[in-house]
């Protein structure tokens, strides 16, 4: 680690967590598992509870246990594809929620008489194809070279996209925290105190301590007869051990394919692939390693795509690299991918326990909101850091125009843009629009002041070496 990096960000990060000992590694893995858990299980919860404009239920029975299983399995597969180098966790993607809603409300053609469970199978077939599009892009990257591809994604494009990733998540943090502001503030306070003034292991696991500490306070308040912050009903009803639906009802879980479903779900991969590149840039900037070049963007795309297709094939949601866990990397400064793989193993094991899923689901949304305040803000801060470390010149009008357009598109198109292909509605999210606009402007506008792959004098670990 160079002295420059030490003075810039504080104490030297931990790149090999084994020196901390097995017990501490297990706890660090638990922290990453808690960080991803809330958002990962929220996707099936939202899919199950979706309604149309008339208030009619159009939810589909997406399983929490299946979601957890393929989050863990997909993460391990991703690490295998990326030579065990990239500290990323793959959780369920929110980008596809609009697709689930569209398919849940589909009542024409073959879908007119289908049950919601049958619609889910065709929806998952579309997810399988979406994952295959990742492999197609990976092939393009491999054939033409990452340097040629990344020339279209300089820091002036990726930096604002990373900022938008965090800021797009911000309303979710506020919404969750608003359910009980004092509890959210308690979670935030514990995290801040542990991270700023904590010593040793306390400083490394502030997120875990924030969740556990604030949950303990919520439990005390609930048992003392105060506000009912924790719902015990789901805990009482859940079994300790249970198999995922694709084990107990294989034919009812396996994906089916239809062109209409593919046209609804597969194009969403455009947005999620752009988010993937942004997340890889964010993780690279956080860790100080150029993962887009080594092990390579084609490998990370293959890992993400295979994880998504495999999940869809057996009735699970699409996967995506998780910003929450990038935020944990920033706070803990433990960059060892082994810790992420421990979290994946936890997710796999716990996917066989409905009781544990219910326990995590009982964590008050206010606590999730308080934690998200920190984590989501960290993601945007990484985008700012990406711009600063690569010395993006904002006295250059070209750079200002590109960054401004990306930010406005990423934040302004909150509902995305919907268009129709073959009678099916397709929605591009704000992030996808921002990425497309940034890439197009960077390619069209003259006066480039950044050349991918040239030594610009930055630290060799930074994204400036792209």
Image (spheres, helix red, strand yellow):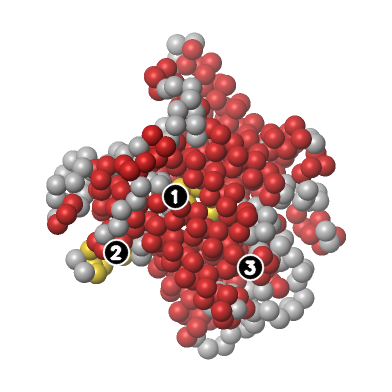
Q: Residue at x 43, y 66 (%)?
A: 133
**Mark whose residue sits in front, 2 or 1:** 1
Along the viewing direction, whichever of 243 and 33 lies nearer the viewer:
243
Number of other residues with Cα within 10 Å of mark 1, as a class: few under 14, some 14 to 19, many 20 or more = many
Q: Residue at x 78, y 48 (%)?
A: 16
Horizontally, residue 149 falls left or right of residue 284, namely left
Q: CA distance from mark 2 to mark 3?
A: 29 Å
Along the viewing direction, whichever of 296 and 98 lies nearer the viewer:
296
Sequence-wise, the earlier of marks 2 and 3 is 2
Sequence-wise, the earlier of marks 2 and 1 is 2
Determine the residue located farthest toward the top in the rendered image.
Answer: 224
Determine the residue located farthest toward the right in the rendered image.
Answer: 3
Sequence-wise, the earlier of marks 3 and 1 is 3
Note whether residue 159 is visible. no
Q: Secondary structure at mark 2?
A: helix
Q: Quadrant of residue 205?
A: top right
Relative image position of residue 315 (x, y in whole percent): 38, 46
């Amino acid at each position: 680690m160079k002295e420059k990096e030490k003075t810039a960000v504080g104490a030297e990060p931990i790149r090999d967590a084994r020196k901390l000992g097995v017990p501490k590694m297990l706890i660090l893995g638990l922290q990453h598992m808690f960080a991803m858990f809330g958002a990962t299980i929220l996707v099936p919860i939202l899919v199950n509870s979706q309604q149309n404009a008339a208030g009619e239920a159009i939810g589909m029975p997406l399983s929490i246990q299946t979601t957890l299983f393929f989050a863990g399995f997909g993460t391990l597969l991703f690490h295998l594809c990326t030579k065990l180098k990239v500290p990323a966790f793959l959780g369920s993607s929110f980008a596809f929620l609009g697709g689930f809603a569209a398919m849940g409300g589909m009542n024409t053609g073959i879908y007119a008489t289908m049950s919601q469970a049958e619609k889910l199978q065709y929806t998952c077939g579309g997810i399988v194809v979406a994952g295959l599009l990742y492999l197609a892009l990976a092939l393009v990257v491999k054939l033409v070279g990452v340097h040629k591809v990344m020339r279209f994604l300089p820091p002036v494009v990726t930096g604002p996209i990373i900022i938008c990733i965090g800021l797009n998540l911000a309303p979710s943090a506020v919404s969750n925290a608003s359910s009980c502001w004092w509890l959210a503030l308690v979670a935030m306070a514990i995290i801040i105190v542990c991270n700023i003034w904590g010593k040793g292991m306390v400083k490394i696991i502030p997120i875990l301590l924030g969740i556990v500490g604030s949950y303990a306070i919520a439990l005390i308040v609930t048992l003392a007869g105060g506000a009912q912050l924790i719902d015990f009903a789901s805990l009482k009803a859940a079994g300790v051990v249970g198999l995922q639906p694709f084990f107990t009802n294989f034919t009812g879980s396996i994906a089916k394919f239809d062109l209409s479903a593919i046209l609804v779900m597969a194009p969403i991969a455009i947005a999620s692939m752009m988010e993937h590149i942004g997340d890889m840039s964010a993780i690279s900037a956080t860790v100080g390693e150029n993962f887009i070049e080594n092990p390579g963007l084609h490998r990370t795309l293959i890992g993400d795509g295979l994880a998504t297709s495999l999940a869809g094939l057996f009735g699970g949601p699409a996967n995506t690299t998780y910003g929450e866990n990038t935020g944990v990397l920033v706070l803990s400064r433990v960059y060892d991918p082994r810790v992420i793989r421990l979290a994946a193993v936890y997710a796999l094991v716990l996917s066989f326990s409905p009781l544990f899923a219910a326990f995590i689901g009982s964590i008050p949304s206010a606590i999730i909101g308080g934690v998200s305040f920190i984590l989501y803000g960290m993601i945007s801060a990484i985008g700012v850091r990406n711009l600063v470390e690569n010395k993006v010149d904002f006295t250059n009008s070209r750079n200002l125009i590109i960054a401004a357009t990306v930010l406005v598109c990423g934040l302004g198109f909150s509902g995305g843009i919907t268009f129709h292909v073959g009678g099916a509605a397709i929605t591009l999210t704000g992030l996808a629009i921002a990425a497309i606009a940034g890439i197009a402007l960077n390619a069209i506008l003259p006066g480039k002041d950044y050349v991918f792959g040239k030594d610009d004098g930055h630290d060799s670990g930074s994204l400036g070496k792209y």
